[in-house]
Amino acid sequence: MSELLHAAGRIRIVLVGTQHPGNIGSAARAIKTMGLQRLVLVAPERFPHADAVAMAAGAGDVLDAAPQAQTLAEAVADCRLVLGCTARSRRIALEELLPREAGARAVATAAQGTQVALVFGRERTGLDNDELQLCHAAVTIPADPAYSSLNLAAAVQVLCYELRLAMLGLQDLAPATGAGAAPAQAGDLPASHAELEGFFAQLGDTLDAIDFHKGRAPESAMRKLRRIFMRSRLDDRDVRLLRGVLADAQRMARLASGGHD
Amino acid sequence: MSELLHAAGRIRIVLVGTQHPGNIGSAARAIKTMGLQRLVLVAPERFPHADAVAMAAGAGDVLDAAPQAQTLAEAVADCRLVLGCTARSRRIALEELLPREAGARAVATAAQGTQVALVFGRERTGLDNDELQLCHAAVTIPADPAYSSLNLAAAVQVLCYELRLAMLGLQDLAPATGAGAAPAQAGDLPASHAELEGFFAQLGDTLDAIDFHKGRAPESAMRKLRRIFMRSRLDDRDVRLLRGVLADAQRMARLASGGHD
């Protein structure tokens, strides 16, 4: 259990493009009441702001310590698990988790010593597609489809609450947390953001080298391939193996085009 | 499950002596997003108020329909289960429930045709002792003892979220997010066994063609690659895409070895 509580230091709540500073303050309060500490702001529209301070109440220290990043990629660069909060209606090909599953997975991953991010988009429009591409899975609060518009701070509160239950080991008050909590392979670290991006860059180069696109725009295929591999939660060794395969395919392509081995 | 959803009509959220009208609006929004309908106000300090309307967003109908009562006793007169939300430190002689337990009990009771109330006290001072006497049990959100001051609207959101999970029958959910759980993408069929085996056979041929193994036994690499792709729960279209990539890599390998395109 103390191991689980230590996980708090490795879990960050990332708010992307927040419009209302009051929501940033409320998020800070939710974070602190639920025993978490780390808030990261990506390009907030208005911050610092008196409304943020007012809504943070006694959690001003969380606000003060919150770093700002220009992009989500920068904010999660060292994270090996990135979960993006989305409304259910999004047509995304990411694995969808309930908050409880997300809490279990986030805390189990952080307890292994790994950095984890829970990401919340803009009040009106949420996360854009490029930002969702950086996420390993989507988290959806099961709101009423007839009116699913949760306030941003309310969504942060629900997720922080589930993280708290997981940290306290209270999650499976009702039955167990099961498969979702487990890392893909015990003992191996999930690949970092940088490792994954290195792999995807090489995958893109390889598709070019083997003339996969044949004049079509490459974006669609790459997006689908990214999703396939993000879903499988690659660890360090998986990435090395896959990059080895790509390196040999690239070598063959060079030979085919008359280059040297 | 539809029985459980009908329970929503018998569950009321009661706010006692609320000081900030914005919290009343936020509570209305939390109620509606979580598929509930009924808000009852006991002696609010300022209501109606523009802040309440602003924070309710699309849940103005919940605000408009909210009856006002002079006392908590009046507000819960017809209820056979009254649960009072309190901070943990209260020295009360009531049974203490976690939000999950409270949600389960409230929904199970309402599903039997009984009126149920969840009661939230004042922002600063909570419920007084006379009000707690009207409650059958206390509900405590397990906040960090070092800073347990949840915003009122945040507390309402957490409880309404647990009510929603209970109404959806998702409370006891053992997250089945691992391999073999739900399909990764709604609308697409998980690939069949035969499709997967066809893909893996072609992957094996491709590794041979690009000379990936270099004399090592192929079994270990193939086993790891299978696991990676099994974890990502491929659908039909994923398999077609991946086989397209493999076909181009095989074509390059033939060219490299002097064959024809």
Image (tube, coloured by chain):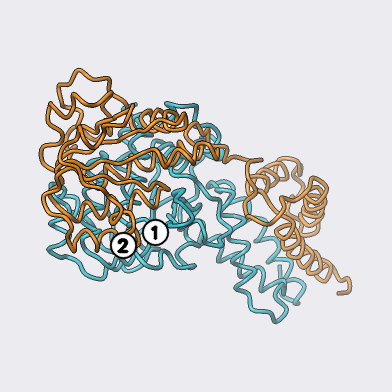
Chain colours: A cyan, B orange
User: Vertical placement of A165 versus A57: above or below?
Assistant: above
Residue at the disc numbered 2: B57
User: Vertical placement of A202 versus A192: above or below?
Assistant: below
SS at mark 2 in the image = helix
Dot 2 and dot 1 residues touching (CB under 8 Å): yes
Chain on which label 1 sits: A
The circle drawn on residue A85 is none
For the residues labelled 2 and 1, the Cα–Cα distance comes to: 9 Å
- Neighbours of disc 2 within 10 Å: few (<14), some (14-19), many (20+): some
| A224 and B28: which is toward the camera | B28
Image quadrant holding the N terminus of chain B, namely top right
Q: What amino acid is at disc 2? A: Ala
Residue pictured at 17% horizontal, 52% vertical: A56
Residue at the disc numbered 1: A149
**B238 displayed left or right of B255:** left
The percent coordinates of residue B195 (x first, y second) are: 80, 51
Query: Is residue A81 in sight in this rendering?
Result: no
The percent coordinates of residue A233 (x first, y second) are: 55, 48
Outermost residue toward the top in this view: B93
Quadrant position of residue A203: bottom right
**B161 displayed left or right of B202:** left
